[in-house]
Image: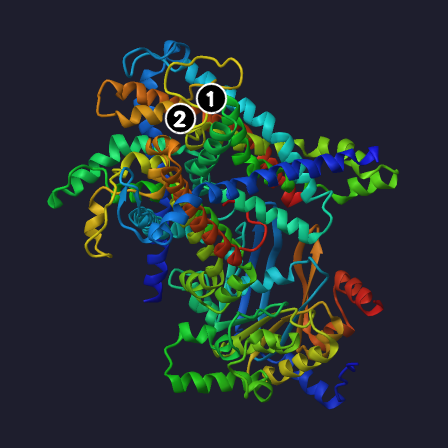
Amino acid sequence: MVEEARRPDVVSLVDRLACQAEPLQPVLAARDMTVSASSGPLLREVNLEIPPGGVFAVIGPSGAGKSTLLKSFNRLLELETPPLTLTGEVEFRGRSIHGGGVDPDSLRSRIGMLFQQPIVFPTTIARNVLFGVRHVERLSRLGLTERLEEALERAALWDEVKDRLDAPAIELSVGQQQRLSLARALALRPEVVLMDEPTSALDPRATAAIEDLIRQLAASQTIVLVTHDLAQARRLADRVACVCRRDGVGEVVETGCCGDLFDNPQCRETMEYLDLGEGA
Amino acid sequence: MRRALDRGLHIVCALCALAAVSLLAGIVVTILGRGLPVIDWSFLFSATGETAGSGGVLFQLLGTLLLLFTTLVVSAPLALGWALAQTVFSPGPLWQRGLRRLLYALNTVPSILFGIFGLIVFVKYLGWGKSWLAGGILLAMMILPTITVAWVERIEALPAKYGRAAAGLGLSRGQIVRSVILPQTWGGGLSGALLGLARAAGETAPILFTAAVFSGATLPTGVRESPVLALPYHIFVLAQDSFDPATGGHLWGSAFVLLATVLGLSLIALPWRLGLAEEATHG
Amino acid sequence: MIRSWTRWASYAATAVVLCFVLSLVSSLVVESLPVLRQEGLSYLSGKTWHSRAGIFGALPMIYGSIVVSVIALALAAPLGVGAALFSAEYLSGRRRWIVKAPIELLAGIPSVVYGLLGVLLLRNWIYELLEPFDPLSGDTLLTAGVLLAVMVLPTVMTLSDDALRGVPASQRRAARGLGLTRAEGILRVSLPQAAPGLAAALLLGFGRALGETIAVFLVVGRQDNQWPETLLSPRAWFEAGQTLTSKLGGSETFVAYGDPLHWGAIVGLGLILLTLVAGLTLLAGRWLPDGRRHA
């Protein structure tokens, strides 16, 4: 079984200082963002800044709007049927993602996404990994091979599949398929990776493998992780945002450094949620 | 480059859809435009005249209606029986799949072969000559798959709780069918029947040799040697002589009446068909 | 066992229909035996049909049926798949009905009405189109093919739409999430995965075209013994021809009635037609998942 990672006190102090230091320009930000469906608002007046590097966790009860928040960052929201409307600003590296000159497709190739269910195309492992890169970048055959290996290495899958890159991808286990999906996203060398409950469909061993992966990636990458597993958030996150429902609409009720939030939550809703989480 | 492909594909697909929709619009508008002016009470209620292209289509309409009525009476019970055998009373999954495949196979049989078969059985072996009953039976078999499939869908969409509750009360399967399934699913059968009749109304090939004549008949008396007039056959024969301009208006009018009949039958079925879609998403 | 009379009634009904189907197939075989015994394979490969001389070669009619259906599909397939793509990939929910409703209505138009449109309108247009080739009339294989294309379009479009919608939305979403454009998602994800269903749609459309009698009868020219000099030359399409169905639907069927050989030859055409259509349906069935509605 997975054990809670216990941070040494020294590291926690350093973290706390880093956390409270002047933030660098956030890689993703939402300002007064409201997302509405035809039936009414889903997320209300979100103000959020995600600093570069590390793991930013989004926690909250199910149905609060965590996934919706995540999808608003790479404009995947506008592909939903029926379409959702978004007011306010969403910024990627300081520039609005809804501006006139912004191409949503190239935005999505710069912001990687991992879904809850691993999605594997009915083709070989190699083609799966290179699926996005093939279209977005013009790489030579050598370039593609290098990118393939790089992505699989970063997803901790290379050793397991390097001898059978031409095998059908569906032969992989669910945990491996999820890492494959991650490799596919990483092959595009995104600046941010969004993860929507990436381990909830996996068994504990596969979950642990993905969590290790996330820790490794966080050193070079910004990761935004939606999870309903509070223990997982504790294990992985540097900063946390809690999304709860107020009056039937999702709101970000609290953000903060991981340690602070869990030990001294400011908000009533956060406290209730944490209580429920811990007790469960 | 990628943008161009994206835009290009969008336009091409939209044009295809536009073309398809325009075809329908064009056909309907043409028939409406040329046929409607011909329609008046005398067209609908008087018999065809002696000269080609004169008079109305009364007996053709009546003949078609008689054929449709016969078709319904023959096919509905058979369709119900098949539907039940494929669902409630099915002895096993193999049987179920086999029946379903057979049904789809029957649906692909070209309609002219029904006519040829009718010629062999009804005219040659039974010696009926041309008979309205033969036409009705052949049409019934032709539309059977349509009715059956609609009914099967409706039966399979029935929530299991009804059957379970009835069985829990001690009802036999037969009783469940009669008191639960039939009352709940007859709408599916009806919509399938309307669609099937819409198709049967327009069919010429099955009745070409076996039931329809072009002239010389009004209403049948008896079964043997009792042909009828029928709208589609009427149009078919006239169309072959269409070089004669006098037939023009009459032809368009007949086509209009036929189209109106067919579309009317399809439209009546619409509420049930939409209802089924609703249940499928909510039920 | 009075309680189960419903069950036995339904079995009886099924048996009646099964009897009908069996006797339909067997009667076609039985009645065509005389010509099969007499002519054997030359019935299928013979290029001349002279009923009075007792020579029955079905090949020109097989050729006619196939040419007409190929033309129909060549026109209907791109249009139908394109329209299906538009409806399945670019439209959502209720907007889809803007395309689907007209197509369903198009499917309901009786063949004799199509035939009428062919005779009164299409025939003249084709005649004018073919002016440079000095045609005899507007009744040609091409005319029949074009008319059939319109008739077969709804089948192709509806089945293609079903096939495309069968591709899981999660796959499309994953492709878009990687930054692929909508067109790339269609070409790389939807179309490849829908390919078996699309193939089935085309096969069934082809079968439908093969079996159509009335509309083809009115515009194909009904000219026997039309055999092209070079097999694949489109030149032959600009002339009148004969298909299996146009022969079956003609007056010769009545004339043949008395003579077993002649009659056998006619019914044999029906048997050939049934075999072709059945073969296509079986092939399509392998690619269609169980439970498809339209055929």
Q: Nearer the viewer, residue B176 or A128?
A: B176
**Quadrant for the C terminus of chain A in the image:** bottom right
At label 2, which amino acid type do we have? Pro
Q: Position of residue B271 (x, y in %)?
A: 57, 31
Q: Is residue B103 above or below residue B69?
A: below
Q: Earlier in the sequence, mark 2 or mark 1?
A: 1
Kindly tell me whether residue A88 is visible in this rendering: no
Q: Chain of mark 2?
A: B
Kindly tell me whether residue C65 is visible in this rendering: yes
Q: Nearer the viewer, residue B65 or B17?
A: B65
Residue that extends furthest to the front in the rendered view of this protein: C38
Q: Position of residue A136 (x, y in %)?
A: 41, 73
The residue singled out by tag 2 in the image is: B232
At label 1, which amino acid type do we have? Thr
Q: Is residue B206 above or below residue A114?
A: above
Q: Chain of mark 1?
A: B
Q: Position of residue C58 (x, y in %)?
A: 33, 47
Q: From the viewer's perspective, is A135 left or right of B104?
A: left
Considering the numbered disc 1 on the image, is that residue within a helix, a strand or a loop? Answer: helix
The residue singled out by tag 1 in the image is: B64
